[in-house]
Amino acid sequence: MDTAVTTESEGTTWGGGNQPLNASYGKMMMWFFIVSDALTFSGFLVSYGFSRFKFIETWPIADEVFTHVPFFHGNYPMIYVAFMTFILIMSSVTMVLAVDAGHKMKKNKVIWYMFATIIGGAIFVGSQAWEWATFIKGDFGALETKGGRVLQFVKADTGERAALADFATALPEDRIKHESKNGIWYQEEGYQTSFSLNEVITGFKANPGILIRTETINEDGEKTLLTREQSLDRLSDAVRVVEGANLIRNEYGSRLFADFFFFITGFHGFHVFSGVVINIIIFFNIILGTYERRGHYEMVEKVGLYWHFVDLVWVFVFTFFYLV
């Protein structure tokens, strides 16, 4: 007669019960959430990749968009984004150290490492908010054509981007920005750009040292630069001035880029902000000795899983938006 033999390790690991796979209910649920959230982010990034491939010839070049550093003027491509990424990765390191200290029941070390993690997350969220504000405001301005194409301006002698303020000519027009006190007119008209279309066209014609480049990327991986004659000809297609980026207009190129940027980085930023809030709650519970009385710091480990997931997602977002 055959006798079924079950070893002790098999029984505890695969036998189910309160701790399937030798993991607590809380950690299992966290893993389920992470897997479902990973699928959500994957869908977003796949959609972004498909759209970029479809409109590759008009997609903005990241090195020309993300060039800002707080308190510094100049062109510093990707410098601040790299700093944000470094801060977030280091916060993941401090979270690992906090979990390890929790396993060893070293309360003071857990407190300090959790505090460092919170500071790193707060810096990242603040930096992302600043980056959003800079992206929305814009630096140079551009024109949009009837077909939705973007015309940017460059200096003929240096090849550098030229801002509208560098050449636009002020005309005796009504250039008062709309104010909320204007009621319905304010709601319907929205915000007025710094310069009108006529002011930009007049200034361009009066400055032969300014050329137009289109959003189309040439074989050299650069935006297509038009001659002076071609630039003057393309001005006839312009219908509006565009400054910065939003969900409708985008001075950097394809408007889909701005839509995906706001949605995906905003969704990730919400995750980081939520993680910071949860970490603060856990931080105060540690100070109050809640987990010390429980005899374990599993809650720190569970929130650590979430934090590592958020960091990993940013690696993919950083790669898709800024590097590729």
Image: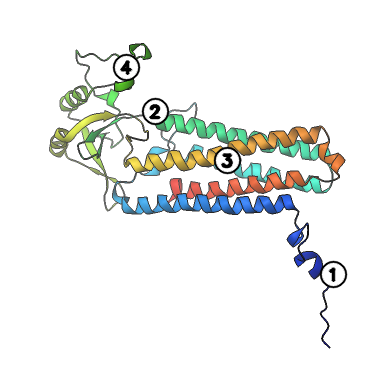
Specify which label sits upstream in the sequence, 2 or 3.
2
Nearer to us in this view, 151 or 155: 151
Circle 2: residue type: Lys
Q: Secondary structure at mark 4?
A: helix
Query: Label 4 vs label 2: CA separation?
Result: 25 Å
Judge whether 275 appears above or below 137 on screen. below
Mark 4 or mark 3: which is in front?
Answer: 4
Label 2 crowd bin: few (<14), some (14–19), many (20+), radius 10 Å: some
Q: Residue tagged by mark 1?
A: 8
Image quadrant where residue 250 sits: top left
| Residue on which disc 3 sits | 271
Q: Nearer the viewer, mark 2 or mark 3?
A: 3
Q: Earlier in the sequence, mark 1 or mark 3?
A: 1
Identify the residue position indicated by label 4 in the image: 184
Q: Which mark is residue 20?
A: none
**Which numbered disc flags the more N-terminal residue, 4 or 2?**
2
Lower sequence index among marks 4 and 3: 4
SS assignment at label 2: helix
Q: Would you say residue 108 is visible in this rendering? A: yes
Which one is in front, 157 or 295?
295
Which residue is label 2 attached to? 137
Can residue 83 be seen in this snapshot?
no
Q: Quadrant of residue 158?
A: top left
Separation of disc 2 and disc 3 at Cα?
24 Å
Q: Is residue 322 above or below residue 195?
A: below
Q: Nearer the viewer, mark 4 or mark 2?
A: 4
Q: What SS does tag 1 mark?
A: helix
Q: Tell me which residue sits at (76%, 36%) in the image.
A: 112
Residue at 82% in and 32% down = 288
Asked if the residue at tag 2 contacts the one at tag 4, i.e. Cβ–Cβ closer than 8 Å, the answer is no
Residue sitting nearer the eye, 167 or 127: 127
